[in-house]
Image (cartoon, grey):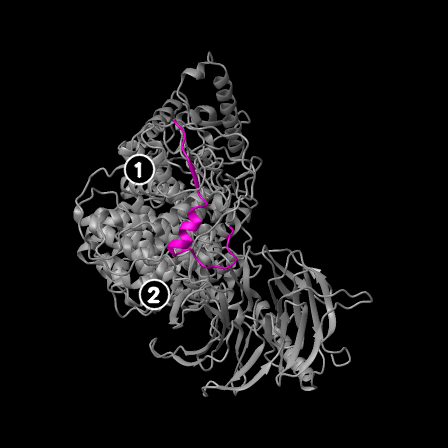
Amino acid sequence: MESEMLQSPLLGLGEEDESDLTDWNLPLAFMKKRHCEKIEGSKSLAQSWRMKDRARYKQSLDPTVDEVKKLCTSLRRNAKEERVLFHYNGHGVPRPTVNGEIWVFNKNYTQYIPLSIYDLQTWMGSPSIFVYDCSNAGLIVKSFKQFALQREQELEVAAINPNHPLAQMPLPPSMKNCIQLAACEANELLPMIPDLPADLFTSCLTTPIKIALRWFCMQKSVRLVPGVTLDLIEKIPGRLNDRRTPLGELNWIFTAITDTIAWNVLPRDLFQKLFRQDLLVASLFRNFLLAERIMRSYNCTPVSSPRLPPTYMHAMWQAWDLAVDICLSQLPTIIEEGTAFRHSPFFAEQLTAFQVWLTMGVENRNPPEQLPIVLQVLLSQVHRLRALDLLGRFLDLGPWAVSLALSVGIFPYVLKLLQSSARELRPLLVFIWAKILAVDSSCQADLVKDNGHKYFLSVLADPYMPAEHRTMTAFILAVIVNNYNTGQEACLQGNLIAICLEQLNDPHPLLRQWVAICLGRIWQNFDSARWCGVRDSAHEKLYSLLSDPIPEVRCAAVFALGTFVGNSAERTDHSTTIDHNVAMMLAQLINDGSPMVRKELVVALSHLVVQYESNFCTVALQFIEEEKNYPLPSPAAPEGGSLTPVRDGPCTPRLRSVSSYGNIRAVTSARSLNKSLQNLSLTEETGSSVAFSPGNLSTSSSASSTLGSPENEEYILSFETIDKMRRVSSYSSLNSLIGVSFNSVYTQIWRVLLHLAADPYPDVSDLAMKVLNSIAYKVSACPAHLCLPRYPKPVHALSLRGSPPTTSTSSSSLTNEVPKPAVSRELQRPSVTNVGVQYTPHSHQFPRTRKMFDKGPEQTADDADDAVGHKSFISAAVQTGFCDWSAKYFAQPVMKIPEEHDLESQIRKEREWRFLRNARVRKQAQKIIQKGISRLDDQIFLNRNPGVPSVVKFHPFTPCIAVADKDSIWHWWWPRGDKGAPWGRPGVLWGWFLQQRQTKHVCTSWNSSLWVPLPCCVPGAGMVVDWEQETGLLMTSGDVRIIRIWDTDREMKVQDIPTGADSCVTSLSCDSHRSLIVAGLGDGSIRVFDRRMALSECRVMTYREHTAWVVKAYLQKHPEGNIMSVSVNGDVRFFDPRMPESMKVLQIVKGLTALDIHPQANLFACGSMNQFTAIYNGNGELINNIKYYDGFMGQRVGAISCLAFHPHWPHLAVGSNDFYISVYSVEKRIR
């Protein structure tokens, strides 16, 4: 900033009797000389020079109006947009007039003439600073505001009236950017104290330390410090800019205290404007706070514009007085005896106060007032380490703390510290910068400009740094290179890729995650970094992270590989080969257990779609053409399968897909597939598109994505079309991944996208639908011959790793849950080929009027603008926000003790309460069971469920049962008969309450063929699941030849155990202590597996004593751990896993439909299709039958559909086909 200073002084004239000092000179000593004014003016200039280095000052002593005008206009012209300082030192001149005039000298006569503030505003312009040091200075401030308002009104009139003189002139700058400082109010006179300068206000603004010490010595409190005189303070050793000297330390303390007062009193925006945007303004206003304190002691009130709140009584002034007292008390011995100066304890004490604030908690408390002082302490090597530690602890409190620190001005301090080579500062600086960038990532340009990235590159490459700090460093570098080409180039030159690759296999999972994200961001849209990664085999090294046990790490690896193939540089055979290899490795994650990974997989594959768009258009056409070749029944009426634009209704809900099969078996055999395809009908009319009719399989349904048409109408690929494409992809003879060609790579990726578009997780399917719809629009908007690959390549064989993903192991049917819009019209396209794809209303989550292409459907795929528009659409629409979500970790407290470990936290108290409640429930239930159970037929609850119950489960510790029907899951509070709101999705087959000691979660499985965690299905019983509470493992099987084990904590498949049978699995039971799994099968066999053993040896026992379908196989948790099994024929068998034959056989009722075993009591219950429930003890003795509901006219129960025992209480819940849910217990006297 270029600052100018203009003076109009008549210094000390007529005031010698009142004050002996003017600008720290004795005027009477120079009255005999003609150059008094020159000496005084040069002295003021020297004082003001310190306010800002490199600023140019000009003084005008006793100026005339013309001189003022000439000087002001000249300074404004030279300063341009910078701020100009106008300093009016008007001692001895007449008071300002009420008309807004100040007085200057008349060159022709020894008198003063008025100068209008309005004219001064015109000459000075904006932005400017005006300092008025004269009596009644407040009048000038008021007049200035009135003239500024007058100017604004004139400009408003000129804007309305074009004939106004100001209308033809350039718009002048607003006077709102001007700052005014006045020595006193409009009705006040300046103080006249002999021991203080006559221009006291100017002295406070220019030499604050000197005037502050002088004023302090004039107070009564100085009597406590003997030997200190006004003459002595002139001898304080040191320099103001040397903090190691007494004078410099006082100046440092003064700066810290005035900054602290301003930050705690002023509004945040005003503090930023006055104390952080300009060094000259900040220096003036810090000194103005001192001027207010001193001049108010003499009944003068300094005025500022903008106006500041009163600060002269702030408590921090007491800390200043103490610092001055400590310094002055040492002066006599320092000057007379030459003793060493003892530094002030001010900063150490303020750090201690800040530490106390941090340790006392931050709930509902004001921000710490010591924060500006902490930043000042960063300049001191003595206190720097402690200050950084406390600052890091403060920033860890959350984003609000980071925002406060940034508002007080932390950035230049910590940026300067990156130049330090001290190793002990590295962890603290890394932590602080991670917190800053987690809240404000716009600092990346400043970091690169000052070579701050080199500091973090060295930290990341330091093997002796803890993994936690290297993780933060990786995050910092990931922010620096994020969408910032300069940062990418700088970090590439700093060898960031090689540094990250060395740490991909670090044991710390968070470091692996952020190293992968950092790699993904550095080569995102930056081809040089991509080829550097190719040379270092970065993509191959990332493959190992695709099977990482932590889902966030897998997701980060998918992100990095997705951006690796997402560059838009010119393609070569080598780069295309690499892209294909990466894509096929990514395709293996199609059935990853984490929806987060599958979402990122869609985004990664979308990059490949953008790069090879024409190839995917060709694949889409091939799929549709193959579908038209299937034999079809007699044509049915077209049901909306044509390519028609349909406007979305205002409230179109998202449609769910509902399987048309009663279990999860997939249509994989040729026979069943052909049978399904017979339900599709195709009709073709001249001049119109091919229409698909789902026939008996499904009706038209909507999807959840948008694509803009030329007429601002949306197009969408329906779920039913995707379902048909998936069946085509599973039935057509496509090349396998072994020896796959270039073209078939696109086919496999297309199949993966079709599979993901039918994912049960809505976010995954929505993203995949967007990608598919982008290609669908391309196919519909251009002739078939234009959708061929732009650069045909010969067929080459690729040596790819891995096996083909199982993408089409199921078939789904969809129902239309929303009526079709009544109005739809055909879109006329070139008749080269008629593509039959269904477009229906899109999801409400996306804009309805977004236009992706500027031209109509005639636009070819070779159009460059079209390609750019398509890529921008994909980039904007297909995003997961995974990286931003991951970055929130660093914005949240990481050093805070978790609430569950805090003895006084609400979470800890709730956990303790639940623990005591659970123990009480177990104890009370055990007492009842020990008494013996003779009957279990006391009906304690009966109510009608909205649907036929298919699954019923008790909550272990609350009087709640979860009931699932074909549409929803209902919660019943059976003591009161209350029913909760429904939730879930159709086709629930199984349920379980998870994490019973903490919060309540429900795990469910659905009868859906959309997402298939179990391939190679065979006809059977649907999905069968068992939950292992202690380990968090989920055992799944059913119509397959394997038992798949999922780790719910890691969200991934752990193990596949082959059943070794051609029959389906009908029941599962596991024991975590012995790692055993017992499976009952449809052929009547009972198989025992030890999951600790190799796959070829894990089946340790097979029992073939049942001759029919096994309804239930249960592995007891008691020490003996026997196996109990029941078949539909009613034979109950007990096995010892160590023995080859059953120990006991019981014969009970036939036609069983449901059975459950009580885990604590020696009971089991079975439900029959013959409308009764039988309860038996462990010896096979019948305890009682339940055939009728309670009541005088109790009706017969329906066929039993499900039943379940309470995990602890002797309660039995029964669901029947007549929609009723009933709960039975022991006699009331026993309960």
Q: Mark 1 points at which residue?
A: 56
Front-most of residues 686 and 889: 686
Q: Is residue 220 magenta?
A: no
Q: Quadrant of the N terminus?
A: top left
Q: Is residue 100 above or below residue 406?
A: above
Q: Which amino acid does label 1 sit on?
A: Arg
Q: Where is residue 186 in the image (x, y as percent from the top left)?
A: 56, 35
Q: Where is residue 1008 in the image (x, y as percent from the top left)?
A: 49, 56
Front-most of residues 670 and 529: 670
Q: Which amino acid does label 2 sit on?
A: Asp
Q: Give the range drawn in magenta.
A: 658-686
Residue depicted at x 21% and y 52%: 578
Q: Which residue lies furthest to the front in this view?
A: 634
Front-most of residues 101 and 496: 496
Q: Could you say whether the residue bearing mark 1 is in a helix, strand or loop? A: loop
- Of callouts 1 and 2, the N-terminal one: 1
Task: Give the number of the disc on residue 548.
Answer: 2
Q: Could you say whether the residue bearing mark 2 is in a helix, strand or loop? A: loop
Q: Position of residue 241 (x, y in %)?
A: 32, 54
On the rendered structure, is 425 left or right of 1209? left
Is residue 30 shown to the viewer in this render? no
How many angstroms separate mark 1 from mark 2 (CA)?
64 Å
Q: Which residue lies furthest to the top in this view?
A: 163
Front-most of residues 914 and 1059: 1059
Task: Give the number of the disc on residue 69.
Answer: none
Classify 10 Å Cα crowding around label 2: few (below 14), some (14-19), many (20 and above): some
Residue depicted at x 28% and y 36%: 787
Q: Is residue 864 above or below residue 1054?
A: above
Q: Where is residue 232 in the image (x, y as percent from the top left)?
A: 40, 59
Residue depicted at x 25% and y 56%: 454
